[in-house]
Amino acid sequence: MSTVTPAGQSVSTPLDLTSLAVTMVIAPAEWTPANITFPVSIDGVNFFDFADAASGLEISRAIQPSTAVKVDQSYTRYANHLKVRSGPRDHPIAQEADRVLTLATSRI
């Protein structure tokens, strides 16, 4: 499964995760370095930043060009739709060109 972050933007196109959970994100070699965060949605229209229940802070994963990072399945288990943001909500980082992120998923 893959999603595109358009050039000059920081948020990817939405993915339909119905019956799926994300287990890994792979960044392309051309990735403009930035941590990733996860806007999630139940209805595919209204997206909300996924945050840690204990701290209330946005969930973030460090990722570099040409790397893969593990994502805890619990992050997306109950989300029907997902976007991947380059950088945090308060300081998004625009990608310099279209970037394709590859996501490994597991059936739930």
Image (cartoon, rainbow, N blue to C red):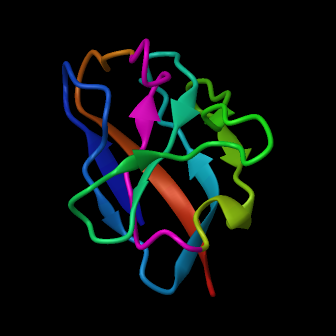
Tell me if residue 86 comes above or below residue 39 in the rendering. above
Q: Position of residue 5 (x, y in %)?
A: 28, 37
Q: Position of residue 30 (x, y in %)?
A: 42, 24
On whether residue 104 falls in the magenta region, the answer is no
Q: Magenta segment, which residues?
A: 78-92
In the displayed structure, does residue 6 sit left or right of residue 17? left
Residue name at image x 53 percent, y 79 percent: 20
Residue name at image x 67 percent, y 36 percent: 56
Give residue 21's quadrant in the image.
bottom right
Residue name at image x 31 percent, y 17 percent: 94
In the displayed structure, does residue 101 sit left or right of residue 67? left
Q: Which is nearer the eye, 11 or 54?
A: 54
Q: Position of residue 35 (x, y in %)?
A: 58, 24
Tell me if residue 91 comes above or below residue 17 in the rendering. above
The C terminus - image quarter: bottom right
Chief secondary structure of the magenta portion: loop
On whether residue 85 falls in the magenta region, the answer is yes
